[in-house]
Image (cartoon, grey):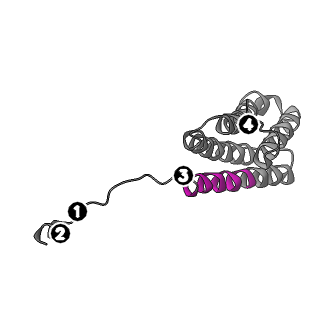
Amino acid sequence: MARYDHLPIYREAYDLALHIEKIVRNFSRYHKYTLGTELRNKSRNIVEKIIEANNTENRRTPLLELRLELETLKVFTRLCHDSGGFSSTRSYLHIAERITNIAKQNEGWIRSRAINRPARSETPLKRADDSRL
């Protein structure tokens, strides 16, 4: 089992999930059981995707899924803010900033996996005009 608690992206995602749990507790009943539940589930899914990406050999698939989870969390967070779920704009901005930080770290992880991928040994393709030589 691979360690994941040392990863900055994991720590940031865990802190975000914990913060969302505390914020949703203070939502009105209407928002708590609709958008609040979605925010809580999405934030936990993000933590799970980070653990999955760290524990698999092919990290590209879970990292791309993480990208999608982060985008949907951004949308639900914005919807919750626009519909009056957050008690203040400050709490919304704090969550939005954390989501952005996690998304940046995820994109860096995706790029580093693309750069560090072992090169395949392929024979160069023959050009059509090489046959005349």
- The rendered magenta stretch, by its main secondary structure, is classed as helix
**Gap between marks 3 and 1 measured at Cα:** 25 Å
Residue 57 x, y percent position in the rendering? 59, 38
Please tell me the numbered disc located at residue 9. Answer: none
Please tell me the numbered disc located at residue 130. Answer: 2
| Mark 3 / mark 4, whichever is N-terminal | 4
List the residue tagged with mark 3. Answer: 117
The 10 Å Cα crowd at callout 1, few under 14, some 14 to 19, many 20 or more, is: few
Q: Are marks 3 and 2 in contact (CB under 8 Å)?
A: no
Q: Which segment is the magenta one?
A: 101-115
Q: Vertically, is 4 above or below 129?
A: above
**Gap between marks 4 and 1 measured at Cα:** 47 Å
**Gap between marks 3 and 4 measured at Cα:** 24 Å
Tally of numbered tags:
4
| Mark 2 / mark 4, whichever is N-terminal | 4
Q: Along the line of sight, which residue is nearer the eye, 85 or 106?
A: 106
Confirm whether the magenta stretch covers residue 108.
Answer: yes
